[in-house]
Image (tube, helix red, strand yellow):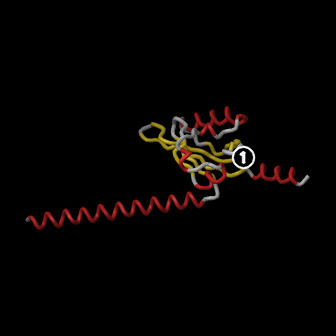
Amino acid sequence: MASHKLKNGEGLHSERKRAEEALRESQERLQDFLDDANDLVQSVAPDDRLLYVNRKWRETLGYTEGEIAGLSLFDIIHPDSLAHCKDVFQRVIAGERVNYIEAKFVAKDGRVITVEGSANCRFEDGKALLHVAFFVISLSAKRRRKKNCGR
């Protein structure tokens, strides 16, 4: 009987180890996917703290991973976009999926970057847990910059 209990305990332990390993591998694949994306991806807490940004976001805006923890979403929003973005943020954490946002971000070095994207929010038990937004650098803004540089 004792050896049967031992085998069951070992089996459960092995099964748990396999499940933990599969979860870790899944998380690593997701992290690789997000970090290899050409889009700027950010995850924001309901209190507007940045929880996660991908590599492209950090490279584009010039922040290190260590600096992200001290930033609020609104720290990187240009004053021209601030009221609009605060309104969109409130709508998203109230449950609305916003399929198109245009905003201006301010990079660490002061550059203004016009972005376009979408945002949604994850809820649990009716409570907003996190706001996720995906942005691309606006092609129309890139074209305007290119046109102005060519003059």
Judge whether 144 appears above or below 129 on screen: below
Work out whether residue 35 or residue 2 is closer to the camera in this orientation and state it: 35
Where residue 127 appears, as percent x and y from the top left, is 45, 37
Where residue 148 appears, as percent x and y from the top left, is 87, 50
Where residue 38 appears, as percent x and y from the top left, is 64, 58
| Residue drawn 50% across the image and 59% down it | 30
Q: Name the quarter where the N terminus is drawn.
A: bottom left
Q: Count the labels in the image.
A: 1
Work out whether residue 22 or residue 127 is closer to the camera in this orientation and state it: 22
| Residue drawn 62% across the image and 55% down it | 56
Work out whether residue 29 or residue 110 is closer to the camera in this orientation and state it: 110
Where residue 108 appears, as percent x and y from the top left, is 66, 45
| Residue drawn 60% across the image and 45% down it | 119
Amino acid residing under circle 1: Ile
Q: Residues within 10 Å of mark 1 (few under 14, many from 20)?
A: some
Left or right of 14 on screen, residue 46: right
Judge whether 7 appears above or below 125 on screen: below
User: Which residue is the extreme one toward the left?
Assistant: 1
Left or right of 2 on screen, residue 64: right
- Per the image, label 1 sits on a secondary structure element best described as strand
The residue that label 1 is drawn on is: 113
Work out whether residue 122 or residue 19 is closer to the camera in this orientation and state it: 19
Left or right of 105 on screen, residue 146: right
